Each structure stands twice: as structure tokens, then as C-alpha cells.
Amino acid sequence: MNPTLVAVRGGLAAMWIELRQLYTNAPSLMGQFLTPTLFLIAIFFLRDRTYHDTELSLGELAVPGLLGGIIAFNGLYGIAEVLALDREDGTLLRAKTIPNGILGYFIGKIGTIAGAVLVQLVVVLTIGALIVGGLSMPDGGLVTLTWVIVLGLLATLPIGAILGGLIVGARDIFLLTLPLMGLIAISGIWYPIAALPGWVQGLAQLFPMYWLGLGMRSGLLPAEAAAIEIDGSWRHLETAAVLGVWSIVGLLLAPIVLRRAARHESGSSVAVRREKAMQRAF
């Protein structure tokens, strides 16, 4: 049988196993939904407040932002953290010893995170819509929402895998936290950034988070809500183009970075990291 096909099948099998473990384990479930629950509580208290001079409630505006934030955070930070932990405990080293094991490992991890994100999106969208009394989804909104989610996952997950492959140990994952939070804060994923300084708008539009937030709002808010965005438009073509470019770059570079990371893995390097982790624990 084709080794690549075997690796793909192995990665998909690992994905289903990890997803089943994730949703049959109470602590894992709490970890998945704790942060979204806190945001949903905030949306509940914002549901009757309007955004500036519009008829949009802050709660209605926050729901697409929360959905986009789930994709961005899990895609960039979540998978990077998983990969860093797997490097430290030797999982990546074990994958290296199997023919095309890195490919199967990559498919399995990407699939697991993507599957978990999709479940979160469905649950949060359902509850969020109930909290704000329904969302004014435009004609074609479901189609827009679908392609934005797909491109958003493709744009963020491989980049997160690259970041995870570049981080040596799990302890260093915190180095991603502040830069990522800073980018998310100015990205417009939570709210329109038309009122921010021009240089901030330009910087935000270089990264996928802005376009992810814009795309989610375009799929869930009425057409007239575009008036509060940059250029007063949803800019679907630009959204697809930018997310598509990030997707291509990530998908091309992620396997290379992961293979490079795996080449530098050895039993001795894993043992050294474990010893350091034990010393920190005590």
C-alpha cells in the first residue's frame, strides 16, 4: 500500500481517537468550554446595549467576534501548545521513527484541533443566538460563514503548527501569549477597527485575524452593518484572498518545519527536557 496513504489513514484514525477521548473526559470538556462560557456570560449582559449610533446590539456584534476568536486562538496558540508538549514528552520523536510518521502526525493534530473547534463553534453560535434573541443572518450568510470558517482554519492551523515546531520546550509557549494577545487586540476580530489610527488598521490587515473577524460578521450580521467597517464594505474578495495566501504559505511550510523539528529530536534531547521539567516541578 502507498506509504503516504497509510500515513493519511493513520492520522485520521488518531484524530477520531483523540476527539473521542476529548469529549468523553470531563476535565477536557471543561477546558474546551470554560473560556467561551465566560464570554457568553459577558454577551448576556451586553445584549441590550447598542453599538454607537447603530441598531446593532453589542451582544449581537460580539457573537461573530467570539466565533472568530475561537478559530484564531485554537488555530494559532492551541496547536502550538500541543506540539510543544509533544516535543517535550517524546511523541514527535516516536512519530519520526515511522515511515511518513510526521505527515500522519500533522494530519492527526490538525484534524483534532479543527474538529474540536467546529464543535465549539456550533455550541457557541447556538447559545449566543439564543442570548441575543436571534441573529439577522443575511441571504447567503450560511454559505459565507462556511467558507470563512474553512479558510480561517486553513490559515491559522498550519501557522500554529509552524510556531509549535519552532518552540523548543513547553515552558517557552508563554512567549507566544503576549504577541498573540496584542495582535488579537488590534486585529478587529472582536469589533470593527475603522475608528483606529490608519497605521493600526494597516498592520491589522496584514494578519488573518482581521479578515476572519470581518468574514464572520459578514455571515452573521445584516448587510447594513457593513457601514461600520473599513470602506463600508464586507470585502469578501479581499477576505478570501488574504486567508487563502496565509493558508497556502502555512500548508507549504508546516510539514517542512515539523520535519526539521523532528530531525533534531533524539532520545537524549527528550531525556534532557524531561529532567529539566522534573527539576522545575520540585
Image (cartoon, rainbow, N blue to C red):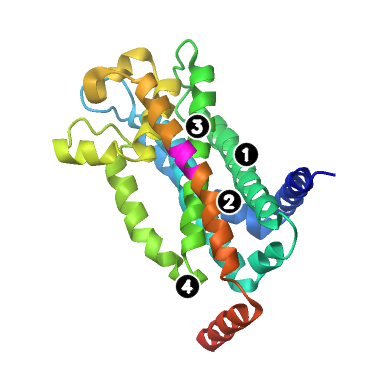
In front here: 121 or 155?
155
Q: Position of residue 103 (x, y in %)?
A: 66, 51
Residue 34 visible in this rendered orientation of the protein: no
Amino acid type, callout 2: Gln
Q: How many marks?
A: 4
Image side of residue 22 versus residue 135, left or right: right
Q: State how far apart marks 4 and 1 are (Cα).
A: 28 Å
Residue neighbourhood size for the residue with mark 3, other residues' Cα within 10 Å, grouped as few (<14), some (14–19), many (≥20): many
- Going from N to C along the chain, the mark reached first, 1 or 2, is 2
Instruction: For the residues labelled 4 and 3, say whether their Cβ atoms are less than 8 Å apart.
Output: no
Q: What SS does tag 3 mark? A: helix
Residue 167, horizontal then vertical, whole percent: 47, 65
Residues under labels 1 and 3: Cα distance? 17 Å
* Residue 119 image label: 1
Q: Is residue 255 visible?
A: yes
Q: Which one is earlier in the sequence, the residue at label 2 or at label 4?
A: 2
Residue linked to disc 3:
151
- CB-based contact (under 8 Å), mark 1 and mark 2: yes
Judged by depth in the image, the label closer to the viewer, 2 or 4, is: 4
Instruction: Tell me which segment is drawn in magenta.
Output: 246-250
In front: label 1 or label 3: 3
Near-viewer residue (84 or 195): 84
Whole-number angstrom distance, CA of label 4 to CA of label 3: 30 Å
Mark 4 and mark 1 lie on one chain; the one further toward the N terminus is 1
Q: CA distance from mark 2 to mark 3?
A: 22 Å
Is disc 1 placed on a helix, strand or loop? helix
- Identify the residue under disc 4: 171
Residue ID for mark 2: 32
